[in-house]
Amino acid sequence: MNSTMLKAKLHRACVTHSELDYEGSCAIDGDLLDFSGIREYEQIQIYNVTNGERFTTYAIRAEAGSKIISVNGAAAHKAAVGDCLIICAYCAYSEQELLNYRPRLVYLDETNTITRSSNTIPVQAA
């Protein structure tokens, strides 16, 4: 049996571009892709914290060090420049793989600079 689990997350990415007249996808700074382990052309889920939209697309590599997060094509209707996003990739893992499973969680500031990374989500006290 396989379980679909969170593979990687870019938490609180800020949209720098929203390009309606583009083939599609989400362009992400190549350094952020490499650090998070999200592959170019990999399916991603995007959760727009600003407006509540949720959609599926795929990642493409933007110039390394550019800090670009560009939502393109039809998805540009769902995210505007300045919106705050959570970008997630998921993967199916076998029971054996789950023994050592850890997601890659990457936390960003408003300039898409990495502030920290982790493999666990902190629990907040009630």
Image: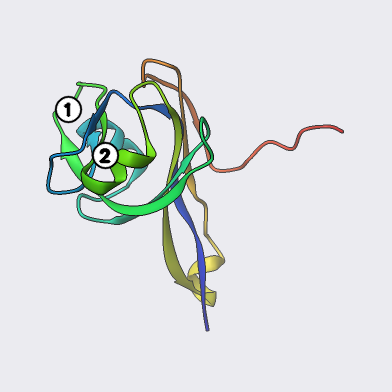
Q: Is residue 17 found left or right of 47 in the rendered image?
A: left
Q: Is residue 10 found left or right of 66 in the rendered image?
A: right
Instruction: Look at the numbered discs 2 and 1 and tell me whether their residues touch, using CB distance below 8 Å.
Output: yes
Instruction: Between residue 42 and residue 22, name the one nearer to us.
Output: 22
Work out whether 3 lies above or below 13.
below
Q: Which residue is mark 2?
A: 34
Instruction: Between residue 88 and residue 2, name the one nearer to us.
Output: 88
**Secondary element at tag 2:** helix
Instruction: Between residue 40 and residue 55, name the one nearer to us.
Output: 55
Report which quarter residue 41 is drawn in. bottom left
Distance in Å between CA atoms under marks 2 and 1: 9 Å
Report which quarter residue 13 is drawn in. top left
Q: Measuring 20% from the left and 38% from the top, which residue is drawn there?
A: 20
Give the quadrant of the C terminus. Answer: top right
Q: Measuring 53% from the left and 60% from the top, which residue is drawn there?
A: 100
Q: Amino acid at mark 2?
A: Asp
Disc nearer the start of the sequence (2/1) = 2
* Residue positioned most to the top: 111
Residue 29 on image: x %, y %: 23, 31
Q: Which residue is mark 1?
A: 64
**Secondary element at tag 1:** loop
